[in-house]
Amino acid sequence: MDAIIRKRELKDSEELAHNIAVVWNTTYHKIVDEDFLKSLFDNEKDASERLKNNLNEQPFYYVLTLQDKIIGWIYFDLTSNLEDAAEIHALYVLKEYQGNGYGKLLYNFALKEIKKHKIKKLVIGCLEGNPANNFYQHLGGKKIGNNLFRGKYLENIYLFDIK
């Protein structure tokens, strides 16, 4: 069975909240505070409720499923702090599925959706130390600056020209 990208649904909230905790703990171990990472597991129920409550407020939130299991997700907006640019807020694939092209599949899906709105630029932030920095550079992202995430973690900002 092939991977399927579809809009996030209400029924995805619990599984997605758990997967967010898992991917953050595997990706950001030794990058962000361990207490914060642990809190993601401790607060999965609250996270699930937030996902349920903001379902209609996030029209560009998609999940990638393989045999009905969520293995990745992408969330983007058509606006950003940079004029005339869309922004990807989250692009994650569970560790055991990384290296199989799923991240690129999600990225290309977002590009296709963004192009429909005649937007020519895209920004993505990626925490310093996250191996995904290499992924974004490989996709053609040009580092244009930094930002502080949660007031204390350095985040690299990448700009993509959409063709």
Image (tube, helix red, strand yellow):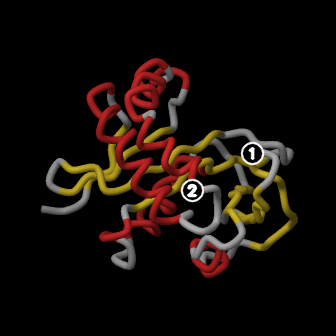
**Which callout, 2 or 1, points at the residue further toward the start of the chain?**
2
Residue shown at the point (31%, 56%) measured from the top left: 71
Q: Residues within 10 Å of mark 1 (few under 14, many from 20)?
A: few
Residue shown at the point (33%, 52%) measured from the top left: 64
Along the line of sight, which residue is nearer the eye, 109 or 80? 80
Which quadrant does the N terminus fall into?
bottom left
Where on the picture, by quarter, is residue 67? bottom left
Q: Amino acid at mark 1?
A: Arg
Query: Which residue is label 1 attached to?
Result: 150
Q: On screen, 32 above or below 52?
A: below
Locate residue 92, reporting x and y percent: 47, 58
Q: On screen, 70 above or below 54?
A: below
Q: Amino acid at mark 2?
A: Glu
Task: Say which mark, if any, is on residue 97.
Answer: none
Locate residue 8, reporting x and y percent: 37, 36
Which quadrant does the C terminus fall into?
bottom right
Q: Is residue 9 left or right of residue 67?
A: right
Query: Which residue is label 2 attached to?
Result: 34
Q: On screen, 123 above or below 26?
A: above
Q: Residues within 10 Å of mark 2 (few under 14, many from 20)?
A: few
Residue shown at the point (45%, 33%) measured from the top left: 43
